[in-house]
Image (tube, rainbow, N blue to C red):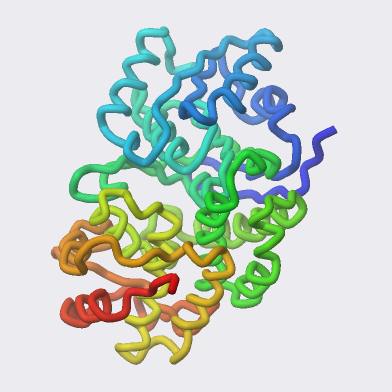
Amino acid sequence: MPVVDGRVTVRSGGGDYPVVIGAGLRHVLPSILAEHAPAHRYAVISDDRVAPLYAAPLVEGLEGAGVRADLFVFPHGEASKNRDEWARLTDAMLSAGHGRDSVVIAVGGGVTGDLAGFVASTYQRGIPVVQVPTSLVAMIDASVGGKTGLDVPAGKNLVGAFHPPRVVVADPETILTLPPFERGQGLVEAMKHGAILDDAYLRELVADSGRLLQGEVAAVTRAVSRSVSLKAGVVTEDEREAGYREILNFGHTLGHAIEAASALRVPHGSAVAAGMVLEARLGERVGVTESGSAETLLQSLRALGPDIIPPIPCPSDRIASFLSADKKARKGSPRFVLLRAPGEVCSDGAWSRELPMDTVETVLRTEWPTAG
């Protein structure tokens, strides 16, 4: 019998919502939906890899309970998080006759959560969404906080909306179908939470890294519960990123630029891992971050595998060219979240700051972390 091992409430202007965490919860999803997101019909959105494993059984379970549900599938991968796929899914829901009394259920990883969430946020001016994350990055980070969005040629997540879910249901057993490399990609976001908020948690993740990479359910449940609690605290204080929530972007200013510059050849987790180390080195260079912090982060991240931070795949000037399109940029200048030390972000009156571009370009050119 599935057991709820963790439950975190996220405070939201659009309505508080629970994140429930427990092994086997996917088997009782119809009852969870009936409690938190009842609907006349459900539109289940998933990618072509996850759909046969978890989305199709959910549709069968809903229909077995006498509830109408339709499955909408898109090609897996970050490249599908675009306006064309959003339009195709929206048109498919319209053709199937979904109305404002429908609920979207996003079943999958971070791409699915962002894309399906944006579909829900715009469909007939907005219908509810439920997040059912099946990857570590989605459980730990992407499914919590209400951000949805699409990638465009200018960069990642530059079109989107805040659309908090009715409920998030995280079943750690689903990551058993992922290879260790993909688990490592998701654990980068957990290490980010430790790096900005809780150094003890960062060290616990390093100590538990072997069990986490193998998908040990107890270890994964602990990490997901702790990360969700940390993120929920930030999101509750600043839901729409007016200030404090910016700290969650540590590593992402350069990480997103690396992703975009490499045409997505560098996966999200690896890009953010590189971005975290580089942004810590930026902080050290400008005298904000405690010396040795970047090396601590680098060694911590390498516990997730020697290939978690790849060699640079494209010129540093190309990476720099994408920085002005970052969501935190002001007047065309990128802004960076800097650490005081592992576990503590430097504020000094603002949670992100502009840095001289020549300093940024020097760090990109000379201090790219490699796996060697």
How far from the left and from the top, in percent, is residue 98? 43, 12
The quarter of the image holding the C terminus is bottom left
Picture layout, residue 266 above or below residue 52: below
The quarter of the image holding the N terminus is top right
| Number of numbered discs overlaid on the protein picture | 0
How far from the left and from the top, in percent, is residue 278? 36, 75
Q: Which of the pair 71/334 is nearer the observer?
A: 71
**Which image quarter: residue 364?**
bottom left
Picture layout, residue 326 above or below residue 148: below
Decide if residue 29 is on the left or right side of residue 340.
Answer: right
Residue ranking furthest to the right: 1
Q: Is residue 244 visible?
A: no
**Which image quarter: residue 79?**
top left
User: Could you tell me which residue is drawn at 30 percent across and 88 percent down?
Assistant: 286
Picture layout, residue 306 above or below residue 203: above
Q: Which of the pair 256/37 is nearer the observer?
A: 256
Decide if residue 34 is on the left or right side of residue 143.
Answer: right
Q: Is residue 371 visible?
A: yes
Q: Which of the pair 186/58 is nearer the observer?
A: 186
Q: Which of the pair 245/271 is nearer the observer?
A: 271
User: Could you tell me which residue is drawn at 36 percent across and 21 percent down?
Assistant: 89
Picture layout, residue 332 above or below residue 366: above
User: Could you tell me which residue is drawn at 43 percent across and 31 percent down?
Assistant: 116
User: Could you tell me which residue is drawn at 63 percent across and 58 percent down?
Assistant: 229
